[in-house]
Amino acid sequence: NTRMLATYAAIDPRVQYLGYTMKVFAKRCDIGDASRGSLSSYAYILMVLYFLQQREPPVIPVLQEIFDGQQIPQRMVDGWNAFFFDDTDELKKRLPSVGKNTESLGELW
């Protein structure tokens, strides 16, 4: 989880700013505590990632969908495939659209 979030943050610094802002917002609104029946801060971060992937053009790619060949590589953790593409240098070669979104943090928020 930490490595995946760090990879997304390395792709675009807005990921870290928006993720942190969302965590603070959830805590301040008292909706960021999974032990009390609300979503976890990690769940809010995943929603931020999904939102950024759906922008046009996307702020960040879906790292789980980038791989060579027909078969998704296996990186098993507790019985789940936790594979994601983590070579940020190679990513820029494969997906020239990365970095094309110019929306400000305010526009994205």
Image (tube, grey):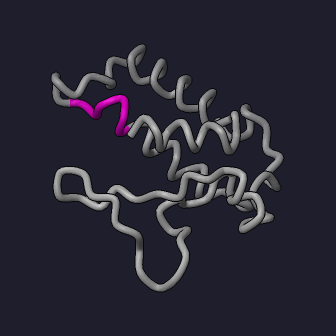
Above or below, 84 against 21 in this view is below
73 left or right of 88? left
Q: For the point 52% across and 83% down, which residue is it?
A: 69
Identify the residue at image location x=47%, y=85%.
70
Closest to the observer, 52 or 26: 52
Q: Position of residue 108 (x, y in %)?
A: 68, 40
Badge count: 0
Q: Where is residue 80 in the image (x, y as percent from the top left)?
A: 23, 58
Indicate left or right for 38 with 45 as reference.
Answer: left
Specify the segment rendered in magenta: 38-43
- The image quadrant that residue 34 belongs to is top left
Q: Does the magenta stretch include residue 42?
A: yes
Q: In which quarter of the image is the C terminus?
A: top right
Question: Quadrant location of the N terminus?
Answer: top left
Pick out the residue farthest to the bottom: 70
Tell me residue 100's x, y (percent): 82, 55
> Is residue 33 covered in magenta?
no
Q: In this view, does 46 lie above or below 96?
A: above
Q: Nearer the viewer, residue 30 or 50?
A: 50
39, 67: nearer the viewer: 67
Residue 105 screen position, x and y as percent: 72, 33
Residue in the image at 30% along x and 61% along y = 81
Front in this rendered view, residue 100 or 32: 100
In the rendered view, does 63 fall on the left or right side of 12? left
Which residue sits furthest top? 28
User: Which residue is painted at 26% across and 22% down in the image?
Assistant: 33
Quadrant of residue 56 in the image?
bottom right
Taking the image as shown, residue 17 lies to the left or right of residue 5, namely right
Q: Is residue 26 above or below residue 106?
A: above
